[in-house]
Image (tube, rainbow, N blue to C red):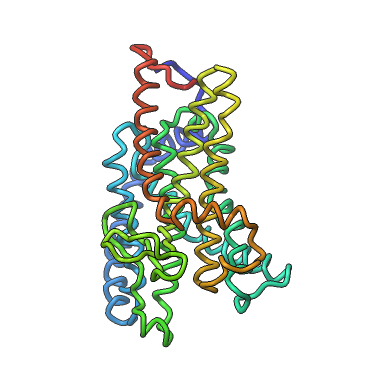
Amino acid sequence: MLDVPPEWWERALDGWKGWWARHAGFARGVVRAQQVASAAALVVGAVALAVVPRLAIGLVPALFMTGCLLVMGLLARTRTLGLRPVLLLMSISVPWSLLIAFTTQAIGEAIGLSTLDDGARIALAAFIEEPGKLLPLLALAVLAPGRIRRLAAVDWALLGFATGAGFTIAEDGARRLAPPGMLAQILGENRLEYSLNPWTAGRFVLPGGGWAESLLDIDGAPAGAMTTGHQIPTMGVAMGVALGLALWRTRRPWLRAAAWLPPAAMLTVAVVDHACYNATVGWSGWADQDTAIPTWIRLLWQALGRGHAQITVSVVLFITCMLVDAHRRHRAGVVGDVAI
């Protein structure tokens, strides 16, 4: 690969490693202290699991999202990122999601919305939350633009998955920590499906009925609105950005003019699915009424299968990203310059 000037964070990292190399004795002491602290943390964690009644239930999303991210890393054959920074991004996204939740609540209160409003009004939170989930990726682009330019398309998928997975961990983990109410006891509080399938982990399908009877779920039963885990729409938008960059790199005017379409389309789909699902949870009949949600959003949601198309679209984009990476690498040849 062609030499590129190191960025500030790379110079800082080299300086940090050099400092530790010059203070080997101190470094060994820190490592031993870290080992002791890790052992103590394991003991404290085991005690907490035994003492705190719902802690094990609350950790289910974190365990499965971590496993799913590792599976994604195995599937992403063209990635250039290691799993360690992606896992770090997922952990950072957990507290970030809490900040976005507080921001959404503050904005809602400022414009006169509350959790007691009908679903069509509460759905407007999707217009804040979906773009907010992407801000960590924007921060990476600002802080390390050179490294971002060298990312493979499938790297964007991993970063988007990690950011969205942090939201799934925070949202469903907090929900599980709270004692279940009467409705949760009747319906079952562990309603979200978790497995090591990255695309279906954290999904939930509302019971079919009314205008949803025309759809069938994977088990053949009538399907209502479906929501995936936050990792899927966020990964979709990130893959849209990757494909937009791939179009821009073609240097063909008609393709470059369309570079904005993939990220804009995927962000629109993410907001529409999120908003309409939230509306359906709060008020099942909102789609048949004149509500605050524009008609085009309602029609697009129904055209996309009321959330059921999101997984298929995500898988297709993921495969496309790997094909784009393979093509880009093939064009690089023996020199290995994939920075453009």
- The residue located at (73%, 68%) in the rendering is 111
Which of the 4 image quarters holds residue 194?
Answer: bottom left
Residue 179 on image: x %, y %: 41, 83
Left or right of 204 in this view: 126: right
* Identity of the residue furthest to the top in this view: 334
Residue 259 on image: x %, y %: 56, 30
- The residue located at (45%, 17%) in the rendering is 3
Q: Nearer the viewer, residue 264 or 285?
A: 285
- The residue located at (39%, 81%) in the rendering is 184
Q: Nearer the viewer, residue 185 or 17?
A: 185
Which of the 4 image quarters holds residue 335?
Answer: top left
Residue 311 on image: x %, y %: 38, 50
Q: Nearer the viewer, residue 247 or 99?
A: 247
Residue 4 on image: x %, y %: 48, 20
- The residue located at (35%, 64%) in the rendering is 61
Measured along the vertical axis of the image, is residue 64 above or below residue 318? Answer: below
Q: Nearer the viewer, residue 110 or 28?
A: 110
Which of the 4 image quarters holds residue 294?
Answer: bottom right
Measured along the vertical axis of the image, is residue 233 above or below residue 251? Answer: below
* Identity of the residue furthest to the right in this view: 111
Measured along the vertical axis of the image, is residue 277 above or below residue 264? Answer: below
Measured along the vertical axis of the image, is residue 224 above or below residue 82? Answer: below
